[in-house]
Image: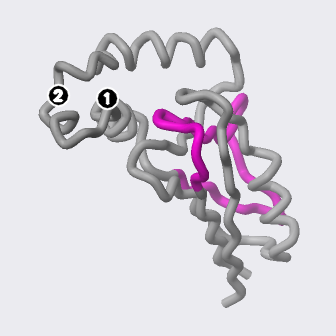
Amino acid sequence: MPSKTAYLEFHTKHKVEFLNITQDVARVVKESGVKEGMVLVNAMHITSSVYINDAESGLIEDFQKWLKKLAPEDISLYKHNLTGEDNAYAHLWRTIMGREVVVAITNGKLDFGPWEQIYYAEFDGQRRKKVLIKIIGE
C-alpha cells in the first residue's frame, strides 16, 4: 500500500498563533499520488494543536477567548510552572483543542464537509515546531 510521510515546520512570530494549513496538506496529498485513502495530520509538540473547523477570523478570536477563560495564562495558577516553565496553560489548551486530525482522501483530494479547513494552533510559540503528515492509501 502506497504511503508518504512529510513534515511541516513552523517558527511562529507570536506565542499564540492560528495558521490555516489546508493548502500545505493538500499539496502533500497531491504529491503522494494517493487517490483513495487517509491522511493523518499530527501536532508533534505538547503545546500545539491540529484541528478542523471553519476558516473565519471571528471564530479564531472566539477560540482564544474561550481557551483563556477555561485555562487562564496566569502562571501562578499552575504547579507545572513551579518547574521553571511558564506554559502550563498551553498544555491544557492543547488537550482541549486536540492533537491530530484524520481526513479522507477521495479522488486524490481532501474530502471535506462544507467550510472545513485544517488549522495548526500554536500555544507556546516563537521556536521551531513540526507537524507530521502521514498518508496511506492507493
> Could you tell me the amino acid type at mark 1?
Tyr
Q: Which residue is mark 2?
A: 78
Tell whether 75 sits left or right of 17.
left
Residue 57 in the image: above or below residue 85: above
> What span is in magenta?
101-129
Q: Where the N terminus falls, by quadrant?
A: bottom right
Q: Position of residue 100 (x, y in %)?
A: 49, 52
**Residue pictured at 48% horizontal, 17% vertical:** 64
Q: Residues at badges 1 and 2 in contact (C-beta under 8 Å)?
A: yes
- First in residue order: circle 1 vs circle 2: 2
Tally of marks: 2
The image shows residue 95 at horizontal and vertical percentages of 33, 40
The spot of residue 88 in percent (x, y) is 28, 34
| Quadrant in the picture for residue 55 | top right
Q: Is residue 64 above or below residue 5?
A: above
| Residue at 39% in and 50% down | 46
List x then y, in percent, for residue 120. Answer: 60, 41
Q: Who's the residue at 64% across and 64% down the image? A: 133
Q: Can you identify the residue that label 1 sits on?
A: 89
| Above or below: residue 58 compared with residue 97 | above
Q: Which quarter of the rendering shows the C terminus?
A: bottom right
Badge 2, how many Cα within 10 Å: few under 14, some, many 20+?
Answer: some
Helix, strand or loop at disc 2?
loop
Give the SS element for disc 1. helix
C-alpha span from label 1 to label 2: 8 Å
Amino acid found under the numbered disc labelled 2: Tyr
Q: Is residue 114 magenta?
A: yes
Frontmost residue, 13 versus 41: 13
The vertical placement of 104 against 33, above or below, is above
The stretch drawn in magenta includes residue 117: yes
Query: For this rendering, which residue is in front, 86 or 52?
Result: 86
